[in-house]
Image (cartoon, rainbow, N blue to C red):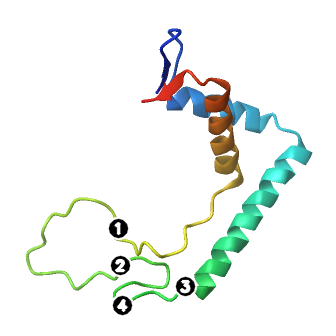
Amino acid sequence: MYTSNTNTHTQNFGKLAQLTSVKYAEMDDLERDEWNQREEADKARYLHELSEYIPPPGFDKNGDAIKPPKPKKPKKTKGGKIRDPNAPKKCVSAYLMYQNAMRSSFQSENPGMVSK
């Protein structure tokens, strides 16, 4: 949530996502093509890094940990998949790139706002 000490305006993630999704939907084709080109460039980067990636022992070609055979009595584990920190980061969609840019511009236009 974004709050400011100078006023009572608050902006949570849901409202910000709603605002950016409306702006993205109203975007003209030329501007949307620009974001799609960024997406394609990021996808090409990811595929290039993935082709050069050599996983260490215990990890698959995507950087995910190879699961050992299940023990007879399974233990509950916390957290998600274990990933190799050196594995390439996955590509981001055009909409998420746009949303991240909008979030950055929102924060720069409202310097009194802080993220909570």
Residue hosting label 1: 81
68 lies above or below 16: below
At horizontal 77% and vertical 58% (from top left) the residue drawn is 38
28 lies above or below 64: above
At horizontal 65% and vertical 31% (from top left) the residue drawn is 108
In front: label 3 or label 1: 3
Counting residues from the start of the chain, the first of labels 1 and 4 encountered is 4
- Horizontal side of 1 relative to 33 (left or right) equals left
What is the secondary structure assignment of the residue under circle 2? loop
At horizontal 46% and vertical 27% (from top left) the residue drawn is 1
- Horizontal side of 34 relative to 24 (left or right) equals right
Residue hosting label 2: 65
Q: Amino acid at mark 3?
A: Tyr
Residue hosting label 3: 53
Query: Which quadrant holds residue 79?
Result: bottom left
What is the secondary structure assignment of the residue under circle 3? loop
Q: Amino acid at mark 4?
A: Pro
The image position of residue 22, as x and y in percent, is: 71, 31
For the residues marked 4 and 3, what is the alpha-carbon distance in whole angstroms?
13 Å
Q: Sort mark 4 into few (<14), some (14-19) or many (20+) by Cα contacts within 10 Å.
A: few
Q: Amino acid at mark 1?
A: Lys
In front: label 1 or label 4: 4
- Horizontal side of 108 relative to 86 (left or right) equals right
For the residues marked 2 and 3, what is the alpha-carbon distance in whole angstroms?
14 Å
Q: Sort mark 2 into few (<14), some (14-19) or many (20+) by Cα contacts within 10 Å.
A: some
State if disc 1 and disc 2 touch (CB < 8 Å): yes
The image position of residue 107, as x and y in percent, is: 61, 31
Query: Which quadrant holds residue 48?
Result: bottom right
Residue hosting label 4: 57
